[in-house]
Amino acid sequence: MNQPKSPNIYQRRVREIMSREVVALNTGDTVHDALTLMGENRVSALPVVDKKNHCVGIISTSDLVDMTRDVDDDIYHLDFVDPASRRFLLDKLAHSMGSEKVDSFMSETVATVHAETTLAQATREMLRNRVHHLPVVDQREHLIGIISTMDILAEFADGATDED
């Protein structure tokens, strides 16, 4: 039987579950770079940082799908395919749109959280902004991590008992 890591899972902090080894893009990187990193690291969103490591945007498979519906109808279903098919479609997209800059397609309005934010607050921020990923920044707004809906769901699942 699993026990929650804290008496109240809602009060756990983002720092406890965030991914610290963030795969990120730099401003000026290409869609090809983004797709390559997404495929190699099996992630569906990448923060975009400037030279000072400030998060200035985020690009997700949803952003890429929206921009490329004209390229291939199969790409529209990218979020719903198995990993091997996803890799094939990402490669196809990289070939057709690879030289475009991510700056043109990233979401520039980025909801971020701090490491001390509670999971309850982070979840509300995701819902309010209709996003699945939140970059985690320090007091100087430098990127230090990322948290996803899957990270949060995993914590809730780990904290659940068989009776739940």
Image (cartoon, helix red, strand yellow):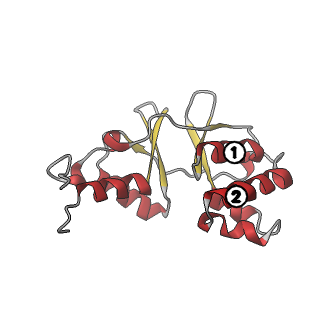
- Amino acid type at circle 2 is Leu
Quadrant that contains the N terminus: bottom left
Circle 2 residues within 10 Å: few <14, some 14–19, many ≥20 = many
Residue positioned 38% across, 41% down in the render: 114
Task: Check disc 1 and report its element: helix, strand or loop.
Answer: helix
Q: Does the residue at mark 2 contact the one at mark 1 (Cβ under 8 Å)? A: yes
Residue positioned 43% across, 59% down in the render: 126
Residue positioned 35% across, 55% down in the render: 154
Q: Which residue is mark 1?
A: 34
x%, y% of residue 83? 62, 57
Q: Which residue is mark 2?
A: 64
> Closest to the observer: 32 or 116?
32
Tell me how far mark 2 sits from mark 1, CA to CA.
10 Å
Task: Check disc 2 and report its element: helix, strand or loop.
Answer: helix
User: Quarter of the image holding residue 25?
Assistant: top right
Left or right? Give the position of 137 relative to 71.
Answer: left
